Amino acid sequence: MNKLFKPLALLGLALTLLPSLLLLLGAIDLGLSKTLMIVGMVFWYLGATPWIGLASPKEDLGEKHNPSI
Amino acid sequence: MSDTSEEIIQPGDEFERRPVPEGARKGHGKFWGMYAGEHAAGTEFMIGPLFLLAGVALKDIFLGLLIGNLLAVLSWRFLCAPIAVQARMTLYYQLEKIAGSGLVKLYNLANGILFCFLAGAMITVSATAVGIPFNIPMPGVEDVLPSNAAFVVITLLVGAVIAVVAARGYDTVARFANVAAPWMVLVFLSCGLVALHQLGAANWEGLNAIWNESIITAQGGEAKSTMGFWSVLLFAWFCNAAMHIGMADLSVFRYAKKASAGWATTAGMFVGHYMAWIAAAFMLAAQIKATGDSNPVPGPMAANVAGLAGIICVIVAGWTTANPTIYRAGLAFQAMIPGSKRTTMTLVAGILATVAGIFPAFAWKLLGFVGLYGTILAPMGAIIFADWHLSGRMGFQKFYAERINSPINVIVLLAWLCPVAIALYFIKFQGIATWFCILPCWVACGILHVVLSKLLQKKVA
C-alpha cells in the first residue's frame, strides 16, 4: 500500500509549495494558490499518515525532554 | 561504566541513569530529520513578526540571523555534542552527579515553570487560528489581558485538548508531529513566498523601502528600532541557549555515534529558524501593506497568504509545540514530587499553560521570554562544561556531589544563582534586553564554578 500512499504524500508536498512559486511567476492568482494548497494538505495527510505514521515506531532521540523553539 | 556492543538493550529503555550503550546509538540521519522538524514550530509564527515590530532593519535580519544561527550550530557541534558522546548521559543524570539531586529538582522546577509559559504562548498561537471560522475578535499587540470572553473560551478549549492529549503520553503526538513536520516546513516557505509576492517589490531596494514603511506603520508613524544587528545575532544564537550551551541536548546527542552529529542542528536553525522567521516577518509586512493592520496574530496572517492550509498549519504548529512542552513540564514537575503520577503532573502543567495562554502578553513578549529562559537555564551548561573539561586541568574534583553523596552541591548553587540574580536585576531594573545577559551569565557561572570548586571542595578519596 506504500506504493499508493508515498506518491500521494509527495504529490501533496508538491501541491503545497508549487502554487506559491506559480504565484510568484504570475501564472496563477492567490485564490487558486490557496485552493491548491488545501488539496496539497489533504493529499499529504492522507498519504503521509499511513506511510510515515505507521511505517515504524518513532525513535526517541531524547528530544522528549527538550522543547523546540 | 561498561559500554559494550554486546550489551542487551531492552525495548523502551531510555538509559536515564546509565550511559547509552553502543548498540543503541543512532546514525546522523536521525538527527537531521529530528532537528529539521522540531524547529519549524509555532514559535516561528510569532518570532519573525516581532522582529518587524521591534524595528529591525531588513539587512540586519538577513545578516544577523545568518551569523547568529551559525553560532548556534557551532555551539551545539563544539560545546554540547563532544561532551554528549563522551559521557553518554542525560543532562539530568550528569547534572545530578555534579550538583546533587536536590539542585536538579530546583533546575527542573525552573524548567517546568518556563515550559508552561512557553506552552501557553503556543496555545495562544493555535487559538488565534481556531477562532477565525467563528469570527472571534483577536487580541491586539497592546493587549496584556484577555481582550474578550470569546477568545478566552477558545483558548481554554484549545488548552484543554492539548493538555489532555499530552497527559495521555508522548508517543501519539510525537508520531503526528513527525508526519506534520515536512508539510509545515513547506507551508512556512510557501507563506513567505506568497507574502513576498504580495509585497510587490521588484528588487532589494524596493523590498527594503516597503519593509521600512511597514515598520513606520506598525509604530504609528515612527521608525524606532529597539533591536539592531547585535540583538538579532544574539537572539538567534541564544534562542536555544538552554539546549546547546545549556547542555540540555546532552540528552539527545548521547545517542549519536560521533560528535559530528551536532552539525544536524543546521537543519533546525536554517530551515526552522532562518527561513521560517523571515517568512513569518514577511507575512506581517504583507498584512500591513494590504490592510494597515500591524497586529502579529498568526491565524489571520497565515489565512491572508495561505488560506485554510495556513490556518491549519498555525493550529498544528502551535499544538505540536505546546503538547510536548506540556509533557516535558509534567515530567519536570513529577521529578519534583516523588511518587506523583506523570498524568496528574502533566494535567497540572496543562492547566498552568492554558491559563497563561489566556493572556496574550506571553506571546507578544516571546522574544524577551525566550531570552529570559536562556538566562536562567543556560548557565547550568557552563557548570557541566567546566566540570567536564577543566576539573582535571584546574585541579578540582569532577562529579563532586556524587563523591560526597550530597543532594546539594552548594558550590553549584552559588555559581548558578549569583550570576543569574545579577542578570535578572539588570533585566528588570536597568532595562537590559534578556538576550544580552545569556553569554555573560554563562561565562561567569563557569568561572565561579572553577574558582569556588578549587577553594571550597574537600578532598574525597
Image: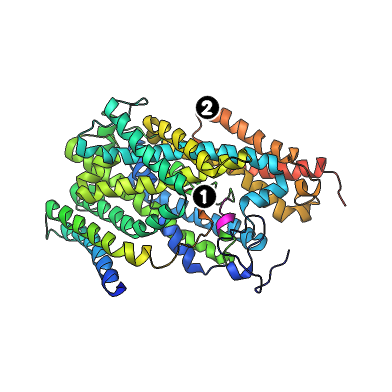
Which quadrant of the figure has residue B85?
A: bottom right
Dot in front, 1 or 2: 1
* Residue drawn at 77 percent across, 42 percent down: B406
Q: CA distance from mark 1 to mark 2?
A: 27 Å
Which quadrant of the figure has residue B334?
A: top right
In the rendered view, would you say B239 is above or below B153?
A: below
In the rendered view, would you say A57 is above or below B197?
A: below
Residue B33 visible in the snapshot:
yes
Q: Amino acid at mark 2?
A: Lys
How many numbered dots are placed on residues in this image? 2
Q: Label the magenta part by its dominant secondary structure.
A: helix
Relative image position of residue B228 (x, y in whole percent): 42, 40
Q: In the figure, is residue B327 to the left or right of B178?
A: right
Relative image position of residue B75 (x, y in whole percent): 55, 55
CB contact under 8 Å: marks 1 and 2? no
- Magenta stretch contains residue B79: no
Q: Chain of mark 1?
A: A
Residue at numbered disc 2? B428
